Amino acid sequence: MRVRSTSLGLGTKLLAAVAIAVVGGCASTSPIPAHQDVARTVKERSGHALRGPRDGEDDKRAEAAIDRLLGAELSADAAVQVALLANPALRAKLAELAIAQADLVQAGLLKNPVFTLGSTAWESEHISPNIFAAVEQDFLDILTMPLRKRIAATELEATKLSLGDHVLELASHVRMAFYKAQAADQVATMRRLVDEAAQTSAELARRQHEAGNMSDLALATDLGLAAQTALELKRSEGEAIVAREELNKWMGVWGPRTGWRMPRRLPELPTAEPPLDHLESAAIAQRLDVAAARRNIQAMGYALSLAKTTRWTGTVSVSVEAGRLRNTNRVALGPSVALEIPLFDQRQAQIAKLAAIRDQAEDEMRGLAVDVRADVRSARARVVTSRAVVEHYGNVIVPLRESVVKYSQEQYDAMLIGVYQLILAKQNEYSAYGEYIEALRDYWIARSDLERAIGGRIGAASKFTSTGAATVAAPEQAH
């Protein structure tokens, strides 16, 4: 039943409440502040700048920076910076900030009022003409707005943390791709030297065989070795091309921008490792994906609280009707309230669903914490092990191979061994150097994995001084 009154007091108060809620719910849909928060976090964790939202001047500066970085000799840090400026998949991912910001604005907006125009079903002796107008508004929408905004704001924070973690993950992938490409190029260079040595040996064998000083078996052995090294050269050159294109993909470059160049050698081992203790607790405290999981759980808690709060109220609609009285010609306003009766649906299904989602999110966060701790321990072990392997190659195996070549050269000069034994010693030296390159690559990849596992840098390579013992130079070409 609708109750009419000539009093304007209640209608005025309702309209005032709606006006206040509308003004309070206004907010900007611009994702720039959220983007700046993500960029600030990325800068603190990685030292790299993130490209801003789409803007003409900003895009020009970013494109110029990309060309400048690719025009110089590319380092791992420069490759990461190029990816953060040029990778289109990253820009697409960052659009989630605008979506979450729009959801926050939407949560602060009231539902639009419903305007009704109609005629009365009774005789028109009280209303002239028998036409009335009404404005209806969901009153509960006003009361629940603060909690809805809290949910959306928490989800926005979770989105910012999740996207920051995504950027750091991309940086990790770029670093690993860079070290793989650099190592593959260095191995290919070494294989060219090995192939040149093998081809020289094969040519000498042919001449010896033609002169009658070499058996068919010895000739076939040297020719087989030369063919094998030529095959390994082709394989290594192909792997270098593939590794380079993999890095291009992660950086998001194509066309003329793929003509970049990199240092010919991997960085050597740092003098010492930063402290590797308490990395598990540090990772749990600073990993952005863990923080995002916490925020998601918090948002689910707010949503569950909202569902429980409104389970017995349902919807509450307040309306005001207006009509002109026949006798007095005054406009009468009649407020009315419509309440949803929670007879069949008390939000029990929605509450149960939200509770299950919250419990699921809590279990997923616990699983993530277990994974993070395991990843930290695994990456730390790989860093320690790969460093020991590199040092063993640099301090023991490669120097021993160099000594074998040195002594073989002395015995060859004294005509105690043949040229083939000298070339074989040189080839073994090349192989040891190739294994050293691969071990050094594995170290830098393990270090990158560790940084990803703890959610931040543990020290840039450029800040360390290389140790003399661990530095291995490429062996000279055989003559």
Image (tube, grey):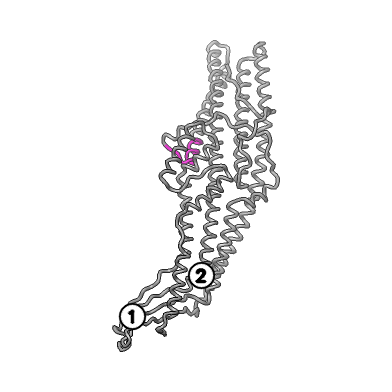
The magenta stretch spans which residues?
Answer: 242-254
Q: Is residue 69 left or right of residue 128?
A: right
Residue at (33% x, 82% y) in the render:
324
Residue at the spot of label 1? 132
Name the one closer to the observer, 246 or 161: 161
Disc 2 residue type?
Thr
The first of marks 1 and 2 along the sequence is 1
Is residue 235 in view from this perspective?
A: no
Task: Tell me the crowding category of disc 1: few under 14, some 14 to 19, or many 20 or more residues within 10 angstroms, Cα based.
Answer: some
Left or right: 218 as drawn, with respect to 112: right
Q: Is residue 341 above or below residue 80?
A: below
Specify the amino acid type for callout 1. Phe
Q: Where residue 144 is drawn, which disc sits there? A: 2
Question: Residue 345 appears at what percent x and percent y?
Answer: 50, 76
The answer to whether residue 140 of the structure is visible from this angle is: yes
Q: Is residue 329 above or below residue 373?
A: below
The secondary element bearing badge 1 is classed as strand
What secondary structure is marked by label 2? loop
